Image (cartoon, helix red, strand yellow):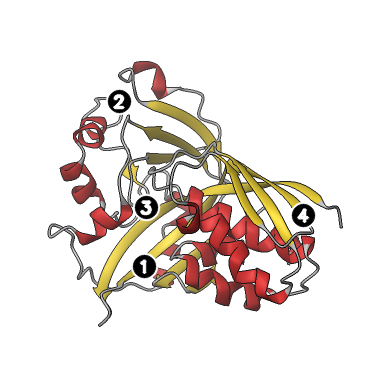
Amino acid sequence: MKSYLNLPAPAKINLFLHIVGRRSDGMHLLQSVFQLIDLCDYIDLEELDNGKIIREGDISWDVEKDLCYRAAKLLQPLTPQKGVRITVKKNIPTGSGLGGGSSDAATVLIALNQLWNLNLQREDLLKLAVKLGADVPFFVQGLNAFVEGIGEIITPLTLPEFTIHLYLPNAKLSTAEVFQSDFLTRNTTSCKIQDFSDYIKNFDRTPWGRNDLEPVARFLSESVNEMFLEPELSKKIRLTGSGAAAFYVVESEEVEDPSLNISKGIQHWKVRGLQKHPLYDWV
């Protein structure tokens, strides 16, 4: 295995996100369908022989709170003499709800398992991923999925080859702030995977479910709310994750570009859904 790697960390969207309750420890119980997309961060990993973990690149926060750094620290006790320099090139906007930080951490877990010759199985990495956050296990599992609990119950799901329009206003939302809001609905009726599966083929025309975090995000951010009032986007888009990005799914053959008629300051990407994580076969 090379001592240097450059690897993708794909984003995701939540086709729906329902908050169905809370545990006694305050953690929210969710049900969602996670769809991988081809918008990616890129992670450089350089093996070091001095036992140090160095985090560089797009970082403006306490390194010890960084998910990539924490992912490496979880694995290092298995090989204390080895270290790594982690450099992240961000393409997934921070605070967008697209799972960039979680995906970066998952890529570090998967890649260091190879780089440090740890030979851990996917189940081993999943147990570590749960310690890093609700979205990290999904990215380690590596397949589109129906996700439940606090993100640890993952049922792989086959989705169509969706084309997706993403929109992002000039805003960032704190996941913690959104989930702590008194306005958040926490008692949506629990569903079964079959409830969603019946709608998969027509999801671009009749989206199923909703995002329970969307009203809170619109309340907390004027920019997010204004995006939902855009004439070209109103009644089409849905918030993904805890925001601030929104999306809608279209048929692959669509040629119209709705971004031509929206206000300046709203970023737009046209992306494709992925069937599996680019590093799926590494584990």
Give the alpha-carbon distance from disc 3 to disc 2, as whole Å: 22 Å
Name the amino acid type tagged 2: Glu
Q: Is residue 77 left or right of residue 191?
A: right
Residue 195's spot in the image, x, y percent?
38, 68
Residue 205 in sight from this viewpoint:
yes
The label number, if any, that marks residue 31 in the structure image = 1
Residue that carries the numbered disc 2 in the rendered image: 232
Most extreme residue toward the right is 1
Name the amino acid type tagged 4: Glu
Choose between 24 and 266: the one closer to the eye: 24
Quarter of the image for residue 96 reads top left
Residue 262's spot in the image, x, y percent?
32, 20
Give the alpha-carbon distance from disc 1 to disc 3, as whole Å: 12 Å
Which circle's residue, 3 or 2, is located before the other in the chain?
A: 2
Q: Is residue 8 left or right of residue 58?
A: right
Give the alpha-carbon distance from disc 4 to disc 1, as whole Å: 38 Å
Q: Residue at 71% x, 76% y: name it.
A: 78
The label number, if any, that marks residue 241 in the structure image = 3
Name the amino acid type tagged 3: Gly
Q: Secondary structure at mark 4?
A: strand
The label number, if any, that marks residue 76 in the structure image = none
Q: Secondary structure at mark 2?
A: loop
Mark whose residue sits in front, 1 or 3: 3
Residue that carries the numbered disc 4 in the rendered image: 47
Instruction: Characterize the local packing of mark 4: few (<14), some (14-19) or many (20 or more) Cα atoms within 10 angstroms.
Output: many
Which circle's residue, 4 or 1, is located before the other in the chain?
A: 1
Mark whose residue sits in front, 3 or 2: 3
Give the alpha-carbon distance from disc 2 to disc 1, as whole Å: 29 Å
Q: Quadrant of the N terminus?
A: bottom right
